[in-house]
């Protein structure tokens, strides 16, 4: 998705949409990889991104992972 040196780059909306779809399909742990890619490309998550991911993790009983995401982003 990310194109090195390309004209078009994904935005926070693009990443959030991908995270939301992963969460809706019950694949929140995979959505965490999208968050990693997002941060690696220098795109900061917004509150919608984070709340979407945390809600998805909690719905899948991944509460411990949700706490890890919160700790990671607060730091």
Image: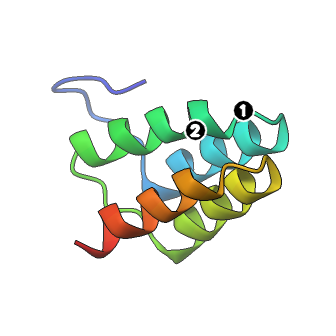
Residue on which disc 2 sits: 31
User: Which one is nearer the viewer's eye here, 22 or 56?
Assistant: 56
What residue is rendered at 62% in x and 45% in y?
A: 19
Quarter placement of the C terminus: bottom left
What residue is rendered at 62% in x and 62% in y?
A: 54
The spot of residue 42 in percent (x, y) is 21, 50
**In this picture, is 20 found above or below 4?**
below
Can residue 9 be seen at all in this image of the molecule? no
Q: Mark 2 and mark 1: span between their CA atoms? A: 7 Å
**In this picture, is 2 found above or below 38?**
above
What residue is rendered at 74% in x and 44% in y?
A: 23
User: Which one is nearer the viewer's eye here, 23 or 42?
Assistant: 23
Q: Are marks 2 and 1 in contact (CB under 8 Å)?
A: yes
**In this picture, is 3 found above or below 68?**
above
Instruction: Tell me the quarter of the picture where residue 69 sits.
Output: bottom left
Tell me the element at label 1: loop
Quarter placement of the N terminus: top left
* Residue 75 as seen in the image, left or right of residue 37: left
Tell me the element at label 2: helix
* Residue 65 as seen in the image, left or right of residue 43: right
Instruction: Tell me the quarter of the picture where residue 44 sits.
Output: bottom left
Residue on which disc 1 sits: 27
Instruction: Tell me the quarter of the picture where residue 30 sits.
Output: top right
């Amino acid at each position: 998705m990310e194109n090195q040196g390309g004209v078009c780059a994904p935005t926070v909306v693009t990443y959030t949409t991908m995270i939301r779809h992963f969460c809706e399909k019950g694949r929140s742990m995979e959505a965490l990889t999208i968050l990693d890619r997002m941060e690696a490309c220098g795109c900061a998550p917004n509150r919608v991104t984070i709340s979407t991911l945390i809600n998805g993790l909690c719905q899948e009983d991944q509460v411990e992972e949700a706490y890890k995401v919160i700790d990671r982003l607060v730091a």
